[in-house]
Amino acid sequence: MEKAWTLGALKPGERARVDHVAGEGRIQQRLSGIGLVSGTKVTCVGKKSDRGLSTYLIRGAMFAIRRKDADLVIMDRSSYTGRRTRKIALAGSPNVGKSTVFNGLTGMRQHTGNWTGKTVEGACGYLDTEAYHYAVTDLPGIYSLSACSPEEAVAADFLKSGAADGVLAVCDASCLERNLNLVFQIRATGVPVLVCLNLMDEAARKGIRIDVEKLSGMLGMPVTGIVARRKEDLRRLECDLDRWMEELDGEAEKDLWESSVPEADMAACTTQEEQREKQTRENIQLAGQICREVVSFRKNGYLNRDLAIDRILTGKRTGYAVMLLLLALVLWITIVGANVPSGLLAKLFSRAEDGLWELSGLIRMPEFLREALIHGMLRVLFQVVSVMLPPMAIFFPLFTLLEDLGYLPRAACNMDRPFEKCGACGKQALTMCMGLGCNAAGVTGCRIIDTGRERIIAILTNSFMPCNGRFPMLIVLSSMFFAGTGVMAAAVPALALTGMICLGAGMTFLWSKILSVFLPGEKGGVFTLELPPYRRPQVGKILVRSVLDRTLFILARAMAVAAPAGLLIWLMANVTVGRQSLLNGLAQLLDPFARLLGLDGVLLLAFLLGFPANEIVLPVALMGYLAQGQLQEQGSAAQIHALLLARGWDLKKAVCVMLFSLFHWPCSTTLLTIRKETKSARLTLLAFLIPTLTGMLVCFCVNTF
């Protein structure tokens, strides 16, 4: 007699229908009550062998059932369906919403932005449907398989390798003709393609209508139209993926490509470049023919609004003024908004510290350990959070808002002419913007620059832009020493900080020019950058992405460094060598050289100890200033200002400290990223020396004159 096949025998991803329940009485009632009756389709989601439990999807609900109980449910063998694994690549041109589709399908939070180059390496995620387990790879945006830059090479090599079982080619429905050339090239590699027309809502607003069914017939490929922001559209896309895979698995795919896309006549082409150019012309002509058949316009002039805005944002007379105004406005909002929450956090942490001090006394913690943990490690940790969190929580959402609006590519267009004069590329402006968040991310983003020489220039000069770790210190010092009165109370610090960033940009131009003279390699790379349409920002996603993916991520990294650094500084301040502490001894050793730069030994030591993360420089300096080797309390900005004045600070010294914070060695993470991107120890050393020597020279000049 054949052994019964039970629910407990299902493996993760497999599904089948219930035949009947073998148990009796209360057990049968319980199993039937949760929906395990004849004909019910059940999917095994996962197994926990250590506890004998398995999880099942039953009529839309998830249940955990013991193996011995699951073996009472007899399954129908004829209804068995195993979940099959397939590899899917997400490919498309920049600005088509590819990463939004990826996030929606996989549940990940890949950074999305309304500008070219924000994805510079592949991201992997997973999607489980009823029939398939998909391994999804989000490739960098490319215009063709003829790679011109590293991130394009990554995408092209992956698509040509045949590693994917199929390609989900994401296209912008509002400008379909531009996208079809890439679709043709991908299909020519022989890999199956499902065309996904994203941004159908934007196309509708522009009066563009696409006959999806006719387009599918002319291309010889399945086509689906969606709006990636809508969950119901993503679920429909999942169903289309399953149907597409079922067709590929069930029968050999008909090669409709040859009948719908004529092969180019390559006989007359003598070189590979000529062949590629001729094929591209054929593809573009075919794309135009197809679009004339399937695309209709209900109204003209849908670009008028964007063109009118561009005349202001990229105009010859207004472009730079708008850039500076937007920068000053963002910094003004950041300074105004950060003061109050920073003070509240300082008071909150001060009370928490007092409570922990009393608690440690009640449990009779050893005095040495009590001091080290609370007055050393926790105090620096609290200071980092109270100083960093408020400005980052304001600055990053504002910066992300500019990304979503589509302003950053316009800024790059404005900056192309000065960069070209310096022998660099206008796309470097985008990597500078990335550097405002994190210099390591800015270095990675340099992959969007086509030529190797210009890419190296962008990498070596990226640290001239102040990253998130340096912003809080610059904001605090500008608020203290450039304070205005009345309505100008926050405007003056904002203008001072804007001037600092402009100085960093100016130094970027200067060093780009110097490096362009001495660095070997191809000169004059082509500058092509798509200007995406202005889109309504997704406020909810902006807040989530800027707070979770940027602010909290960076804060967690800073805290991970600040806690051990606080403990180390406390030990250095309390371990004596002779008659003075180790901290004071090192500070005095560095003091003569630091004085030449307008600093002091404590500050220079703080910058050295801040090499792992710039975020801890100011808290470490404040700790070093106190005779006890600890921050006495979580003071407000006014209390910190009083402490600095008591240590001999004036406007000149504040300016020197801000300048050295702007121009000094990159953090360890950035240097490791540079080493990884350039694969050169010499270039990594150069990336360390250029900003460091620049900062020393600038500070020496300011201090001397």
Image: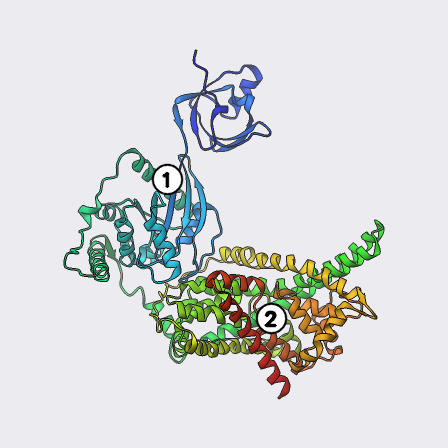
**Helix, strand or loop status at disc 1:** helix
Query: Where the C terminus falls, by quadrant?
Result: bottom right
How packed is label 2: few (under 14 Cα within 10 Å), some, or many (20 or more)? many
In the picture provided, is 472 more to the left or to the right than 542?
right
* Amino acid identity at mark 2: Ile
Is 473 left, or right, of 524 in this rendering? right
Q: Are the residues at dot 2 and dot 1 in contact (C-beta closer than 8 Å)?
A: no
Residue 617: % across, % down: 66, 68
**Residue 239, numbered label:** 1
What is the basis of the colouring in this image?
rainbow
The first of marks 2 and 1 along the sequence is 1
Q: What's the residue at 43%, 29% (across, down)?
A: 15
Does residue 242 sit above or below 4 in this rendering? below
Inspect this view and state whether residue 191 appears. Answer: yes
Residue 594: quarter of image: bottom right
The reply, left or right, for residue 326 in relation to residue 131 is right
Instruction: Give residue 335's mark.
Output: 2
* Residue at image coords 52%, 72%: 464
Amino acid bearing label 1: Cys
Quadrant into which the N terminus falls: top left
What crowding class fits label 1: few (fewer than 14 Cα within 10 Å), some (14-19), or many (20 or more)? Answer: some
Residue 490's spot in the image, x, y percent?
Answer: 61, 75
Residue 625 seen anywhere in this rendered image of the structure: no
